[in-house]
């Protein structure tokens, strides 16, 4: 199978979405001239061009695209060619209203924006197949073609009747019989037993709490229905050009798509990342997305979209201060990206995203943004030759969409419990300690990681539970967070509330009760090692059976009961953390568990806000702080970005980056 | 007519909803064993069993229910048998979409949850009638049968076309002619005059404020339409088993059902109560619900549902700390309950309420909850023999759904004015003073109460106004709150803004203007007796005509105007309270009015947070506080819960309860 | 063309909406007696009388209206006669459901409130035409008739299929060809290209951000569609009674109607004003609305509706403290009104607005409100003979609905940027400095104003840009606020982000980036003249090219960059203000620019909260403060309200007003 290197060909891909159809052709010449000036080597074209390519049903207008691709090729710029299927032309919705999605309340989602397609619609699928076929046929051998980009940020859901029929087929394949479905969904509750497949509908607007397994399966189905759309198009382009890698761009930590399954179906894993430039934890967030994407890719990955400046869809859209765009771009390279791209090359003058920045903004080539883009292009050229290693992690965080989906349903102990927030808190604690982590699926082979973290997996399959037990038994160190192992694959509560296998592993007789905390409420926990700290969000009434209470509650209903436990199991160790410790305490706790396991940061004594990460033999140093920092780096190095020698310490400006190669390597 | 004692038969009913159809039959054996161990003597079955009982239209599957009822009977456990009509099977909505309710905006409420029936649908009603008939026919003489439970928490509203036709019939019966309707609804305003019955629809989505009397009548109609569903099923079961009492479980202070009317149509009044365990006023709230339910029942009543631990539908669902479940259960007995039941016996493993606790939780019989349930069962056995008296109140609070409905419409002086909040504030003030109150309908015979409270009745009928005047004239003491007597039965403003009869009674020439207060805004009021206090929510510009100004405004627009007045009228006295005093001031004010009337708490010098209430000859003492308390109880008593002698004082733990019988009685 | 004086006939119109159909006819006699007692000389009748006038399709019931008009005439009270078309009778929606509007999500807006008509419906339009024709025919020569009032507060929007067809016709007329529309809407973005007119729909519910120019044109279309309804009715009444002026009542600063266009189509400009009596800036708000309405009218205008006391549609509805109703009424006269009217004469007893106050409230003629109404009536008689001059302003604020519409679309730099808020801030700053302003359209002749203010016009046409440049070139002083001149008429971003003509005028090479501020965030700005002040909401990275930096940023990302600039251009001066200064600083800044231009308040040394404004030769002094004030007025005057001599200073009570005529004039 082709991979990212078939597109990158030894370079770091650099460029962005390019929508020349929004501009007169005389602007195109300026575009490629400035692309070359900026070191751009790749352009993503055609993402939203369906109405241009197929102005009416069955018609084709490829001439302009021929000229665009030829122009790019002439200028040495490769093309990531997109199928245009994320946004059907208005004629489709007008002529085939059944292709328009319907909301939970039955109302229609119209055209006039984008993404207005029902993934279950045979009409939509047929049109999508045909335009993809013609596009692949025409450009299969175009010299500019480097990669196929299918659709864009798959995210639609639909509750229409066609979707209902499709959902039934999917359920029938999953369960085989209606009895099995009734059993899995627990339809004995509230008189929901289905007597015929035809009765089943998506979880539409209801009076009260909807059946949670119906909701969970609809999440699974929707991800799969979109995946069918993806694979149908992927198969077409792969048939025409087998050597060209295929991708679709993920939204990071997007709840709608099962990223593990999807990543397995594409040649290149790519992602769009848009942290808020004002988020003080933007660097930690980026690192998490990079780690997740790299783990999904199993190697180099592609940053498909980021903003050179502000986006336009937040309440208040802040530009990126000088240096921040470069910092976050190089952070992606540090954490495994071989492609750093943007949405979009030239900022639009019209339409819904005209205030979304571009590499070339409204103020043009004289503006700060384009100058910084050029600088980044030069940096990437400097790094391309040197960067070839991989990011190796000694720790992994378990993450699973099924657990996320099941755990976010209504009717649970606390609606304040947000899966992503807990995941971010744990990853950030490790990142701030300088420990680089992978993400892994709960049923994956985990044996290469000395340290394993499970911040919160409400749902764990039998296989995952056995996997965890085997991991610790074989010597691994597991740190497990609260409200984990509660539900089985059908969102059925495990006997005892928490699965007995997990309890045995953790050395707990019982988790008697979940005591979720109100917003702003804290519990006080005393840890002999870490001192007293506060916990938020959650607490539990634990009864140990073998586990050592590392930290106990002080005061409150749970006074004296354990809050954090540690349990030797087989050749390994299992920790349990039943609260969400305040950030400093979580950092110290996880660092302690890591240290016991021999997992340590690449450099000791890192200043706060400086990230240090190895990619192959290179050491990336990234200063996320508002102030300059001095970093001790024992020995003699060369900074690849400046070419300067670095001995024993290096000074980093605000948002400064260094990429060090140890002399002699 | 049969009553609660026909079911209780000298015991206090103790048990819960039992849904064995959610479990394999081998679990049933453990269920009844543990029920017996816990002292459970009653189980409510069948509430949501329609899809199981009638798996497809007209089919019947009663075998499992036969076995359940036989098993209960064999084990000495009585059954409250429910008609399953609260949750129609999916086949009904799928085959008869017109049975599904529609929202104000026309969108459909689907199955997949519960309560998805239109109360006006003949199809739904027919299916409901037939399953009820067959159920009643089959189990009419089953020895386990103790009570019929119709439907569950009636609460649906519907705005569909069938509802529109039904609404028109109801209106036609109410008004006789379209002219009378146009007059009552004030359709001269905004060109709303109806020219034909067919034009009338429920108050659907509109551009601006809907006609308030249309809204009020739709509230009345919806309550009545649901009541028709109830009485149709009641008549069937009563015909089959005339000696078995019939109930349906109310939600307390639920705005959707006119509780006075409904209570009159059932043999047993039962209620579901779910205070937030973290609500510091949960005890006061429970007391109010108990008082209201007892008043609706006119004697002993049934606590049909409460949670042994956390519920699952709040934002954050807190367990009950040790002792709280017992405290609140015994509080219900203290205030007249002869049945203490739970939703549900065994916590579900699947479905929308799997995180709603049960008497037997996921952690099982070893858990704290089941241990406390057993303890409560034993307490109830101890009390059953001794408890037979009634709770006698010397004070009554007037409460009326019509006033609530009319007063909560949009387009009024203040949307911050919340009927239930005002009612709670007044009841809590009395409860904290140790004064037990009944609730009463404004047109009821009030002569047995020395003290009458009207916290806020925006709408008062002519009959009610005459009733109030007669009550005071005959010597009663009335304390009347603001914004009362403003509207007539059709929500037509009374001449002068406040009805002249009420003004005469209160000694007021005019209520010139309502000055509602903003959130957080207060007015300062000076009372010669109580000192200076602050008022919130509301104020008024009063012009006395005979009334004595007890407290006057200090500062602000109303500086020097009376805020609280007192007026001798006939042989009685009428107070008027035109602000919502801060809690301590309201408590002092009502205690003063009570004291003048000779209405006093059962024990003087009660510590704060300790509730004392007489039921017959027994004195219940309940400590709602977080700390232990010592209560002076002059004389010699026996605590029925411990069997210990109590002389002159008793110590109560946090959440502790004592039930004292004076020695010699 | 007839004008307001044809109705006022030398008097100041005084009265209110009069809805006798809500009352028995014996009340009418009391009405006119009390009207005469209060000095009422005008009554607006028929606004919501359609169902009464046309009880079923085609029927007519004019008898009651004959009697009302005769009664008014007999008592010397003129009538403003309304077409009843704002609220179709229920029979129209019931028989012709296509006349009911549909929301963006397709749901129907029902009758039962008001305004339930689709402006594009031929059925509605036909019925409206016919009732208007008959009304005009019947009352064309009635002696009571003084003015025609068309419909009421036009405000409905509709997204139905009929509207879609109408929208297409409107677009076809605007653009001529589909290619031109595709170009204007930028449909190359997101694959939105239209291939046939039939594909175009209103901007209905979509998945993500809707096409902004589609949204902008739908705003324009909706204003125009309503205007077609207005002009159709206007033409009918004008044909029947050519000497009678025609109006429709505006809601002030209502985004739905292009006030400049509408005002040009009516003989009298009238407005409804409902400031919150608790708004500390209510006086400033009133002044702004008066100034805008006067500018739209180009002379005397009509205050059609205000409340004598509380309204009923806010969350909390406060009465007006004593004096406030008079103050705000006389403020309108001061700023050019020749008519001071109310909604409504007699407070309704039923319907959605029964808690909206009237001139005659529920408490009747003995109440405070009616007493103050009588006092105001007497004041107006005193003023009527003396008031004949106009309000002359030396400053104008540019205001344009197109800019408002375009700038409020989703997907912009900051959703906190609220057009009306910025407009209010600037007008209030001038008002507090005592500088009376007109409002003007950006393409209007501005040459008579020494000072021109553009708080924020995101969209400026080419003609407007040229107009501004010409204005300054010819010697005018322009003060221009941020984020102005960004978009062209189609909401296409101008090259460079801000139009080059505006940049030249302002002396700016570039506005590099918009740095919107978060809620609560401020920037610090240092001004050599005004000292250090803080800016909120917005900031920008400016590159001057000729402009002098009046104030610069201190600290933050923009440290040292100019925040306020001043640029000599031609014979004039152009200021640019790139932040929203805190109120005191904005006041000082604008006062400085005004002072340089020779624009000064009518009196120096005015106490805070006292408004001074000249109308012709009269000087109105209005104390908006909570406390009395003493105002220096050099020379000898007579206060027309009291008849007293005033020499050198005058004392004003809280909410006090004086109208001074200089002795000898």
Image (tube, coloured by chain):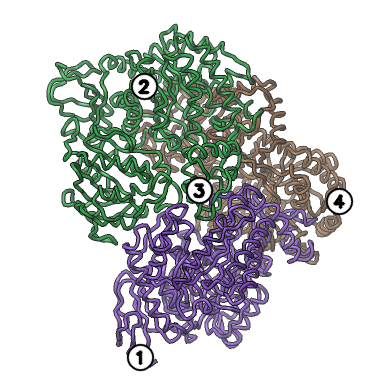
Chain colours: A brown, B green, C purple
Question: Callout 1: few (<14), some (14-19), or many (20+) C-alpha neighbours within 10 Å?
Answer: few
Whether tag 4 and tag 3 are in contact, CB under 8 A, the answer is: no
Give the image location of residue A302, x and y in percent: 69, 47
Q: Nearer the viewer, residue C218 or B135?
A: B135
2 vs 1, front mark:
1
Marker disc for residue B182: 3
B139 left or right, relative to B10: right
Q: What chain is tagged by disc 3? A: B
Residue located farthest toward the bottom when viewing the structure as drawn: C664
Give the image location of residue C98, x and y in percent: 67, 50
Question: Callout 3: few (<14), some (14-19), or many (20+) C-alpha neighbours within 10 Å?
Answer: some
Q: Are marks 2 and 1 on the same chain?
A: no
Q: Secondary structure at mark 4?
A: loop
Q: Which residue is mark 1?
A: C663
1 vs 4, front mark:
1
Location of the N terminus of chain C by quadrant is bottom right
A463 left or right, relative to A115: left
Along the polypeptide, which appears first: circle 3 or circle 2?
Answer: 3
A313 left or right, relative to A631: right
Q: Which residue is mark 4?
A: A59
1 vs 3, front mark:
3
User: Distance between the Cα atoms at labels 3 and 2?
Assistant: 48 Å
Q: Secondary structure at mark 1?
A: loop
Q: What chain is tagged by disc 2? A: B
User: Distance between the Cα atoms at labels 4 and 2?
Assistant: 73 Å
Residue B327, placed above or below residue A619: above
Q: What chain is tagged by disc 4? A: A
Q: Which residue is mark 2?
A: B340
């Amino acid at each position: 199978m082709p991979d990212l290197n078939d597109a990158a060909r030894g370079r770091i891909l650099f460029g962005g979405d390019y929508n020349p159809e929004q501009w007169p052709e005389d602007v195109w010449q300026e575009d490629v001239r400035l692309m070359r000036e900026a070191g751009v080597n790749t352009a993503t074209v055609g993402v939203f061009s369906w109405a241009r390519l197929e102005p009416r049903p069955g018609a084709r207008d490829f001439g302009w695209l021929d000229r665009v691709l030829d122009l790019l090729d002439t200028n040495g710029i490769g093309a990531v060619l997109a199928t245009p299927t994320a946004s059907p032309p208005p004629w489709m919705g007008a002529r085939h209203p059944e292709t328009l999605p319907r909301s939970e309340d039955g109302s229609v989602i119209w055209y006039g924006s984008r993404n207005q397609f029902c993934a279950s619609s045979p009409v939509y699928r047929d049109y999508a197949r045909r335009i993809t076929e013609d596009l692949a046929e025409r450009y299969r051998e175009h010299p500019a073609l480097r990669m196929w980009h299918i659709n864009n940020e798959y995210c639609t859901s639909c509750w229409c009747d066609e979707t209902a029929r499709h959902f039934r087929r999917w359920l029938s394949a999953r369960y085989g019989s209606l009895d099995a479905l009734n059993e899995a969904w627990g339809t004995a509750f509230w008189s929901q037993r289905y007597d015929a497949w035809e009765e089943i509908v998506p979880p539409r607007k209801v009076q009260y709490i909807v059946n949670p397994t119906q909701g969970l399966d609809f999440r699974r189905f929707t991800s799969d229905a979109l995946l069918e759309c993806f694979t149908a198009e992927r198969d077409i382009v792969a048939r025409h050009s087998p050597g060209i890698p295929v991708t679709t761009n993920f939204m990071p930590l997007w709840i709608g798509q099962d990223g593990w399954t999807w990543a397995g179906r594409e040649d290149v894993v790519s992602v769009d990342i848009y942290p808020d430039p004002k988020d003080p934890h933007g660097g930690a967030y980026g690192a998490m997305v990079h780690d997740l994407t790299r783990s999904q890719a199993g190697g180099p990955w592609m940053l498909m979209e980021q903003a050179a400046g502000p986006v336009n869809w937040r309440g208040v859209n802040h530009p990126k201060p000088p240096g921040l765009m470069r910092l976050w771009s190089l952070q992606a390279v540090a954490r495994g990206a071989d492609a750093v791209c943007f949405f979009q090359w030239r900022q639009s003058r019209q339409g819904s995203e005209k205030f979304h920045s571009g590499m070339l903004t409204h103020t043009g080539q004289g503006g700060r943004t384009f100058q910084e883009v050029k600088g980044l292009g030069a940096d990437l050229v400097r790094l391309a030759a040197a960067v070839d290693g991989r990011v190796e992690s000694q720790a992994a965080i378990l993450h699973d969409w099924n657990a996320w989906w099941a755990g976010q349903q209504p009717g649970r102990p606390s609606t304040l419990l947000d899966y992503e927030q807990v995941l971010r808190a744990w990853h950030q604690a490790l990142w701030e300690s300088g420990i680089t982590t992978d993400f892994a699926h709960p049923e994956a082979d985990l044996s290469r990681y000395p340290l394993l973290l499970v911040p919160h997996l409400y749902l764990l399959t039998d296989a995952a539970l056995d996997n965890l037990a085997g991991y610790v038994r074989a010597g691994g160190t597991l740190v497990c967070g609260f409200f984990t192992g509660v539900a089985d694959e059908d969102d059925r509560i495990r006997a005892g509330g928490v699965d007995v296998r997990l309890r045995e592993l953790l050395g707990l007789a019982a988790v008697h009760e979940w005591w979720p905390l109100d917003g702003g409420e804290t519990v006080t926990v005393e840890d002999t090692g870490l001192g007293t700290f506060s916990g938020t969000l959650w607490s539990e009434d634990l009864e140990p059976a073998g586990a050592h209470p590392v930290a106990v509650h002080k005061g409150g209903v749970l006074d004296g009961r354990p809050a954090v436990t540690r349990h030797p199991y087989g050749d390994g160790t299992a920790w349990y953390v039943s609260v969400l410790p305040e950030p400093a305490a979580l950092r110290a706790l996880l660092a302690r568990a890591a240290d016991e396991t021999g997992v340590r940061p690449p450099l000791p004594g890192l200043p706060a806000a400086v990230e240090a990460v190895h990619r192959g033999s290179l050491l990336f140093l990234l200063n996320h702080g508002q102030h300059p920092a001095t970093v001790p780096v024992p020995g003699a190095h060369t900074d690849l970005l400046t070419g300067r020698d670095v001995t024993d310490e290096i000074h980093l400006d605000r948002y400064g980056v260094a990429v060090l190669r140890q002399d002699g390597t």
